[in-house]
Image (cartoon, helix red, strand yellow):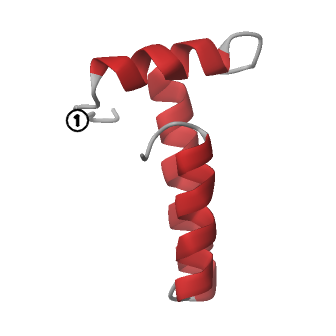
């Protein structure tokens, strides 16, 4: 059985995420966060270590999604 933990994000960000995922296959904020984190972890594991440029690209993608300001 999979165990879960809680990640806190500001309410205004959660509201923006809910608006963003409308009409997508993501059912809720947790689905999107899991997808994003898995993507980052998988990329990191494949390459061994993220370069500064890759980290910046991921940061910009997360900023575009409203996760970072």
Above-or-below relation of 53 to 36: below
Q: Residues within 10 Å of mark 1 (few under 14, many from 20)?
A: few
Residue position for label 1: 5
Left or right, 42 with respect to 4, comes to: right
Q: Residue furthest front?
A: 69
Evaluate whether residue 8 shows in this view.
yes
Residue shown at the point (45%, 40%) measured from the top left: 67
| Residue in the foreground of this view, choosing between 38 and 56 | 56
Residue at 43% x, 47% y: name it.
Answer: 68
Question: At 51% from the left edge and 36% from the top edge, which residue is drawn?
Answer: 66
| Number of marks in picture | 1
Question: Which residue lies at the image location 44% right of the left edge and 26% below the top edge?
Answer: 30
The quarter of the displayed image where residue 58 is located: bottom right
Tell me the element at label 1.
loop
Q: Indicate the position of residue 17 as horizontal and vertical percent values.
A: 52, 23
Q: Position of residue 38 (x, y in %)?
A: 54, 53
* Residue 59 point in image, percent of width and height: 52, 61
Quarter containing the N terminus: top left
Q: Please give left or right for residue 2 compared with residue 34 in the image.
A: left
Where is residue 64? Give x, y as percent: 62, 44
Residue 28 seen in this snapshot = no
């Amino acid at each position: 059985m999979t165990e879960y933990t809680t990640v806190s994000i500001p309410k205004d960000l959660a509201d923006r995420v809910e608006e963003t995922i409308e009409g997508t296959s993501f059912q809720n904020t947790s689905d999107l966060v899991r997808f994003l984190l898995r993507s980052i972890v998988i990329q990191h594991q494949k390459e061994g270590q993220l370069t500064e440029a890759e980290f910046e690209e991921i940061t910009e993608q997360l900023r575009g999604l409203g996760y970072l300001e």
